[in-house]
Image (cartoon, rainbow, N blue to C red):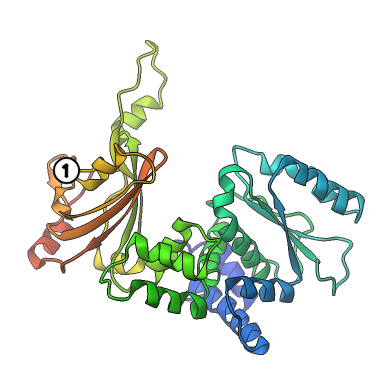
Amino acid sequence: MTRLDAATEILELAKELGVGAAAPVDGILDYCRHRIDGWVAEAGGVTGIDALESLVTKRLQMVFEEIRSEEDFDRLTEVYARGKKEFVFAGMRTKFDDDGNPTFGALVLRRNATADSPDRFVAVIDCRGNKLARRFFTRWHEIAHRLTTHADGGATEPGYRSEHDPIERMMDEIAGHVGFYGPIFDPAYQQASFGKSHLTFSTVEAIISEAFPTASFQATLFACARRLTTPVVYLEAALAHKKEVKRKLATPSMFGDDPPPGELRAVKVIPNKAAQQDGFTIPTNMRVPAASVLHRLFDAEPLTDDDDNEDLSQWESRGKTLERRAVVVEGRKVADRVIAIVQPVEKRRARDHCAQRNSLFTT
C-alpha cells in the first residue's frame, strides 16, 4: 500500500465511490476507466483523444472555459456572473493569480443550472504564460474531479487545494491514466517504440505527434514510464545545496555573507513502479557525477539533447557509491535545469544488491 492509499481523504473517496479499501488508488482508477469504457462502447468507439474528451465531457455535463489573457476573466464575469447570475466567477481572478498556491484549473457547479443542463459544470483552465504547457493535463485533471469527487453533486464553490493535497494528487493519477486512454495510447506507443529496447525522448515525441498533439512532453513521458514493465527513473538536475548547507541558509546571517555556490544535484527523482520493485533509484538531492552527460547538458544551450552509457557507481556521496550497474542516461536542457531518464541496461549484480541494502546515503 502506498502513502496515497493510506490517506484518509482517499479512503473516504473510495468508500463514496463504492470501491475496495484494500487498494483504494487502484480501485478509484479502475472505477474511472470502467466508466469511460462504458461510454466509449455505447458510442461505438472514438477516433482519437479529442473525440474521447468530447464524449466524456458531454456525458459529465461539462464545458471548458480557457483563460488566455486578462480579458478572458472579464468575459467570464460578463457571461456567467452578470448573464447567468453565477457570482463565483466574478472573484475567480484572485485565485488564479495567487503565487503562493498556483491554480491551473477550477471546476464550478453552477447554482442556476438545471439537472439536465449541458453546461451544469464549468471547468476554468488557466492557459496564460507557462501554465499553457499543462493545458492538456489540467483539462483531464478537472475531468477527473467530475468523474469522482462529488461526482453527482458537490460544492457550489470550487476547491482551491494545494497541489500536495491527497485529493489533488489522486486527480493527477487519474488524469495520467484516462487522459492517455489505453486504446488510443497503447497502439501509438507500440508503433513509436518498435525496435527500441528502452524508452527514448524520440519515442515520447512520436507519440505526441501521432496521437496526443496537445499533450506536454513531460506528461507524455510520465505516461510512457507508467506503462513500462522495465525500470526507468525520471530525474531533474539543477543547482542546489546539500542538506547541511540548506539548514544554515535557512538561518539569516548577521554578517550578510553570500551563500556558497550550489552544485548540480538530482532535485527531483521519480521512479516508475518497475524501478521501485527493482530497487533502482537515485537518492533525491544527490550530487550529479562530474563525468555524467547531465553535467555537459547543464552547460549547453536550452533544448539541447544528449545521451550516454554510464555506470550507476559514478554517483557518490561522502565516500559511498550507488551499486555498480550499467545504465543509459538521456537528458535535455530546459531553462535552469536538465530533465533526464535513467534506465539500467543490465540486471542487478547479486553482491552489489546485498551491499546496497546495507548502505545508507546522506546527501
**Quarter occupied by residue 250:** top left
Q: Along the line of sight, which residue is nearer the eye, 24 or 240?
A: 240
Whether residue 270 sits left or right of residue 5 in the image: it is left
**Quarter occupied by residue 341:** bottom left
Q: Is residue 262 above or below residue 276?
A: above
Residue 339: image location, x then y, percent:
36, 49
Whether residue 310 sits left or right of residue 340 in the image: it is left
Residue 255: image location, x then y, percent:
37, 10
Residue 81: image location, x then y, percent:
87, 50
Q: Is residue 352 above or below residue 236?
A: below
Residue hosting label 1: 291
Q: Is residue 130 visible?
A: yes
Residue 125: image location, x then y, percent:
67, 54
Whether residue 42 sits left or right of residue 313 in the image: it is right
Q: Is residue 78 above or below residue 212?
A: above
Whether residue 64 sits left or right of residue 320 in the image: it is right
Q: Please name the residue shown 53% across and 78% down the image.
A: 30
Q: Quadrant of the C terminus?
A: top left
Q: Along the line of sight, which residue is nearer the eye, 44 or 318?
A: 44
**Quarter occupied by residue 228:** bottom left
The disc labelled 1 sits on which kind of residue?
A: Ala
Give the number of marks.
1
Query: For mark 1, does the 10 Å Cα neighbourhood hold few (<14), some (14 to 19), or many (20 or more) residues?
Result: few
Q: Along the line of sight, which residue is nearer the eye, 213 or 111?
A: 213
Q: Is residue 19 visible?
A: no
Q: Quadrant of the N terminus?
A: bottom left
**Which residue lies most toward the top here?**
255
The residue tagged with tag 1: helix, strand or loop?
A: loop
Q: Along the line of sight, which residue is nearer the eye, 7 or 107?
A: 107
